[in-house]
Image (cartoon, rainbow, N blue to C red):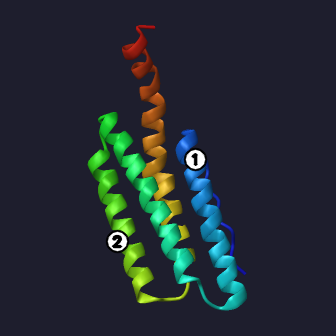
């Protein structure tokens, strides 16, 4: 039986929603693999596309905010996505579980730090834009 993986919120609603959606899809794929003995390559590819889109949204916001640790976070995305793509191409069973673990580590390190930076930047951005 696959243990469900949930993401703790990082305090950024848009990204928290993305994380919940990705986790739900990966958990469902892992459950299906447990039940049927294999994963749907089509669903795995669709989930990977969703992860890539999420990373792109994060990276755009990092650039907009001149996020201090942007380069490190981008490298983490590149490594994570390259490993997920290669793993998917290999056809090894257990893709969803491996991606869940990798994303959970990423979320509890890089994404959590980015969430803190976004939260800290919001009052400054509001002040700059509105003068209040």
Q: Say which quadrant the N terminus sits in.
A: bottom right
Residue 43 drawn at (x, y percent): 56, 75
Q: Are marks 1 and 2 in contact (CB under 8 Å)?
A: no
Crowd class of label 1 (few under 14; some 14 to 19; many from 20; radius 10 Å): some
Crowd class of label 2 (few under 14; some 14 to 19; many from 20; radius 10 Å): few
Residue at 53 percent of width and 46 percent of height: 15
Secondary element at tag 1: helix
Residue 126 drawn at (x, y percent): 44, 18
Vertical arrangement, residue 102 with respect to residue 18, above or below = below
Task: Report which quarter residue 40 is drawn in.
Answer: bottom right
Outermost residue on the bottom side: it is: 37
Left or right of residue 95, residue 29 in this image: right
- Give the Cα distance between marks 1 and 2: 23 Å
Vertical arrangement, residue 38 with respect to residue 85, above or below = below
Residue at 58 percent of width and 40 percent of height: 13
Residue 8 drawn at (x, y percent): 61, 51
Residue at 52 percent of width and 68 percent of height: 47
Q: Which residue is mark 1?
A: 16
Q: Which residue is mark 2?
A: 82
Outermost residue on the left side: it is: 71
Left or right of residue 107, residue 1 in this image: right
Task: Report which quarter residue 120 is drawn in.
Answer: top left
């Amino acid at each position: 039986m696959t243990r469900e993986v949930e993401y703790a919120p990082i305090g950024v609603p848009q990204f928290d929603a993305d994380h919940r959606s990705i986790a739900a899809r990966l958990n469902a794929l892992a459950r299906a693999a447990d039940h049927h003995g294999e994963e749907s390559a089509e669903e795995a590819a669709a989930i990977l596309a969703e992860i890539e889109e999420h990373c792109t949204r994060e990276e755009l916001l990092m650039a907009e905010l001149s996020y201090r640790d942007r380069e490190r976070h981008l490298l983490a995305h590149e490594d994570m996505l390259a490993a997920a793509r290669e793993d998917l191409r290999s056809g090894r069973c257990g893709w969803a579980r491996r991606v869940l673990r990798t994303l959970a580590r990423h979320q509890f390190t890089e994404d959590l730090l980015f969430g803190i930076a976004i939260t800290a930047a919001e009052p400054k951005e509001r002040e700059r834009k509105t003068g209040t």
